[in-house]
Image (spheres, rainbow, N blue to C red):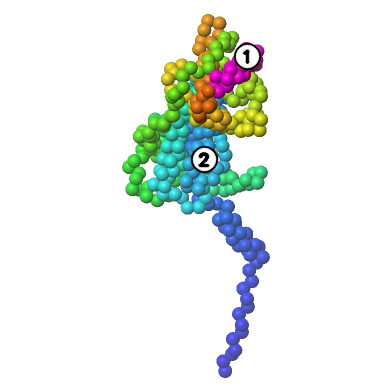
Amino acid sequence: MLRSQQPLAPIRIPDTVFVTILAFACLIIYTKNQMSQTLLFIPDISGFTEFVNNTAVEHSHHIIAELLEKLIDANELGLELVEVEGDALFFHREGDLPSLPELMSQVERMTVAFHQHLMRYNHQRICQCGACKTAVNLKLKFVAHSGPMQYIEVAGRRKPYGKDVIQVHRLLKNQVPTSEYLLVSHYLADRLEKWDEHKHQFRHLKEQYDGHSVPYFYQEVSKFRQDLPPPELRSISFETTNPLTLDLHVDRAPEELFEVISNFKYRKLWNTEPDFLFEESHLNRAGMTHVCIVDEREILFETVKKGDSDNPFVYGEKTRDIPMMEYVSSYFSVEENNQGSCLRFELYLKPKSFAAKILTPFIKTQARRRSRKLLEQLKNVAEGKADLKLQKSVET
């Protein structure tokens, strides 16, 4: 007779082995959730240190802030800003890495936005300080890297963390023999789509960091700005002649007096009657607007350049919001003399109608009285405020 088979006893896994397997599985899941391929991308303004050290500090800060804003606005890859690092922006993007053409498109867009802004500012600027005169010489470089990234949460913000974050910042210090370039780490290059099709456009170098060799590739990007058209600048020509003209001596150097006139921060010190609204985060320049509120009426003024003047210290404003006038323009011209500065104020009135033209002499009489009072207040502020932190004209 056949014996009936006894059922097999269940295999018993020791508790210690089970715990070990479970812990290992959890570790894999945790690592998968915490580590991801992430693009690290840093646009960095070259020449920033020399620019700040050798120029007027206040204006240089405004210029750099505007440039960083332009770079942020030019983001087309869905990059997330990790930090503003002085003269640089630290971006990251989780998930799929871009292709090389997509990365180059991002670099081109930021380079064009950066240099278009500098060219426009150089055409529109009215200030002659070192920062404003040399801003057009600033350059832009890019460093791109990637790696299996960990993240930490700081003050409610999720940030990339680890050795690859250190690596991308180290790559900012390199031996690339040009001032404007895209640097791509070897690690990232191996993972970029279409790299093999375009890698001939890059050159290969390597650096030593803490005794380790770090290879990378670079390509010049100055080509993206070579054919940028110059910005258009609207200068003012006048159909009217015989402006209201007032002259005044001010015991202050021309560049310092010009700063008191053109910097809106000082305007309220000598033009105290109207409420004054302006964009504090931007430097005054041709085309910029501000609002004066007089008797609850808002008057919009635009900063303008005088087209027929070679004097660098000429500041003008124009408005179309004065009753009976097509426009009203005023100019402050500052020239050096032996004892300080000679200030000339000119007021141009363009009547809208024949009736307004008849009344213009009476309007000028009132304007002369108000303008003379205004200039005396300006003189008192410029001469009496020795602690004004005025911008200096610095040659670099």
Task: Please tell me whether residue 36 is drawn above or below residue 261 in the rendered image.
Answer: below
Where disc 1 sits, the SS reads: helix
The residue shown at (61%, 16%) is 369
Q: Nearer the viewer, residue 299 or 130?
A: 299
Q: Around disc 1, counting alpha carbons within 10 Å, would you say few (fewer than 14), some (14 to 19), or many (20 or more)?
A: some
Residue identifier under label 2 = 72
> Residue 363 is drawn in which quadrant?
top right
| Residue 168 forms part of the magenta stretch | no
Residue range highlighted in magenta: 359-385
Image coordinates for residue 204, horizontal then vertical, percent? 37, 38
Which is nearer the N-term, disc 2 or disc 1?
2
| Residue 377 forms part of the magenta stretch | yes
Please state, as top left, top right, bottom left or bottom right, where the N terminus lies in the image: bottom right
The residue shown at (60%, 62%) is 21
Residue type at tag 1: Glu
Task: Please tell me whether residue 28 is drawn above or below residue 267 in the rendered image.
Answer: below
The residue shown at (43%, 34%) is 116
Question: Does residue 101 appear left or right of residue 88 in this picture?
Answer: left
Image coordinates for residue 345, horizontal then vertical, percent? 54, 16
User: Could one spot residue 147 in this view of the protein?
Assistant: no
Residue type at tag 2: Ile
Q: Residue 68 — which label?
A: none
Q: Around disc 2, counting alpha carbons within 10 Å, would you say few (fewer than 14), some (14 to 19), or many (20 or more)?
A: some
Image coordinates for residue 341, horizontal then vertical, percent? 54, 10
Task: Please tell me whether residue 389 is drawn above or below residue 91 in the rendered image.
Answer: above
> Residue 12 is drawn in which quadrant?
bottom right
Q: Residue 376 — which label?
A: 1
Mark 2 or 1: the one toward you: 1
User: Could one spot residue 322 in this view of the protein?
Assistant: yes
Q: Nearer the viewer, residue 259 or 108?
A: 259
Task: Please tell me whether residue 291 is drawn above or below residue 200 in the rendered image.
Answer: above
